[in-house]
């Protein structure tokens, strides 16, 4: 076992071709790591490994003959958060920033039309780190808050909709200055894939509904278009 010195070198030294396994998860003073080096590893290589570990949650450091080829191999656990949405609702999940987000999302949704019922929740990523919430339907606000808490990713937001559909709200939501991206908009059950690091949690994708079982036929095409005309989305 090697103690990590309080002061790390500011440079990143060159290293010889080899792989060094670096193990250690404790952060703060008195941290210790184990270095498992190939035969012939030099002190510069060990310093590089310890410094990179100190800067991130790496599980291995691979060094080559060139300094710029130092790579950090990270093992990041992924948590699956299963989201069951209330009957008759749709969900929109996205990424935003800034404490003003929840108010601007509310104003964007309420401007879509007088019949839309909604609840929104937004996870702060710094400061008080609260789940900010708003909406015009108490039940949907509570459910959106519960889903946001389960996801637990900084700057993620959840909007639950009733008496309206994502196609009605996506462009207004995308136009909100704080919104960075939308990861899903659906009425299906959703599995949210959340990466977990020492810094926190982040959405890396979603599983939306179930996989396809075939390719549509001409009869299916006609049925699809007939459905769209029936609900007023196609002339």
Image (cartoon, helix red, strand yellow):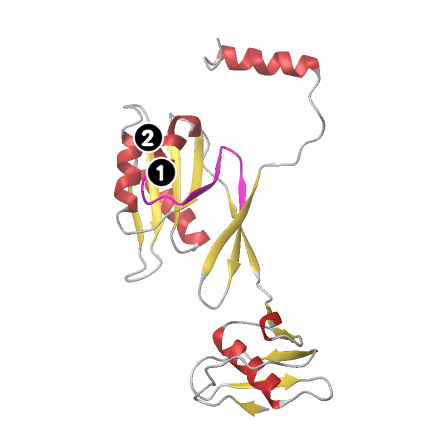
| Quadrant of the drawing holding the N terminus | bottom right
Towards the viewer: 128 or 14: 14
Which numbered circle lies on residue 115? none
Q: In this view, does 132 lie to the left or right of 6?
A: left
Q: Which residue is drawn at 26% across and 35% down?
A: 107
> Is residue 178 inside the magenta stretch?
yes
- Label 2 close to label 1 by CB (< 8 Å): yes
Q: Residues within 10 Å of mark 2 (few under 14, many from 20)?
A: many
Q: Residue at x 39, y 32 (%)?
A: 161
Q: Quick one: which residue is furthest to the right in this view?
A: 39
Towards the viewer: 28 or 134: 28
First to last magenta residue range = 176-192
Which numbered circle lies on residue 140? 1
Q: Position of residue 151 (x, y in %)?
A: 45, 52
- Look at the picture and state if 183 lies above or below 153: above
Secondary structure, mark 2, is: strand
Query: Of callouts 2 and 1, which one flags the residue occurring earlier in the amino acid sequence?
Result: 2
- Look at the picture and state if 20 lies above or below 106: below
Q: How crowded is mark 1: few (under 14 residues within 10 Å), some or many (20 or more)?
A: many
Q: Position of residue 140 (x, y in %)?
A: 35, 38
> Is residue 70 inside the magenta stretch?
no
Which numbered circle lies on residue 117? 2
Q: In this view, does 188 lie to the left or right of 107?
A: right
CA gap, disc 2 to disc 1? Answer: 8 Å
């Amino acid at each position: 076992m090697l103690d990590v010195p309080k002061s790390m070198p500011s440079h990143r030294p060159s290293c010889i071709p080899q792989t060094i396994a670096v193990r250690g998860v404790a952060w703060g003073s008195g941290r210790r790591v184990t270095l498992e080096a190939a035969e012939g590893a030099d002190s510069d290589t060990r310093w590089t490994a310890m410094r990179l570990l100190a800067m991130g949650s790496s599980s291995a450091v691979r060094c080559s003959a060139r300094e710029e080829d130092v790579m950090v191999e990270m093992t990041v656990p992924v948590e699956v958060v299963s989201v069951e949405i209330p009957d008759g609702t749709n969900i929109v999940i996205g990424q935003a920033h800034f404490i003003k987000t929840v108010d601007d999302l509310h104003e964007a949704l309420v401007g879509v039309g007088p019949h839309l019922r909604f609840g929104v929740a937004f996870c702060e990523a710094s400061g008080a780190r609260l789940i900010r919430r708003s909406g015009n339907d108490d039940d949907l606000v509570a459910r959106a808050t519960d889903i946001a808490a389960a996801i637990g990713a900084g700057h993620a937001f959840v909007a639950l909709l009733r008496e309206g559909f994502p196609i009605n709200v996506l462009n207004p939501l995308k136009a909100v200055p704080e919104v960075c991206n939308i990861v899903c908009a659906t009425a299906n059950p959703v599995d949210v894939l959340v990466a977990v690091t020492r810094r926190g949690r982040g959405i890396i994708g979603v599983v939306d509904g179930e996989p396809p079982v075939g390719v549509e036929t001409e009869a299916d095409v006609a049925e699809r278009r007939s459905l769209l005309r029936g609900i007023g989305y196609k002339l």
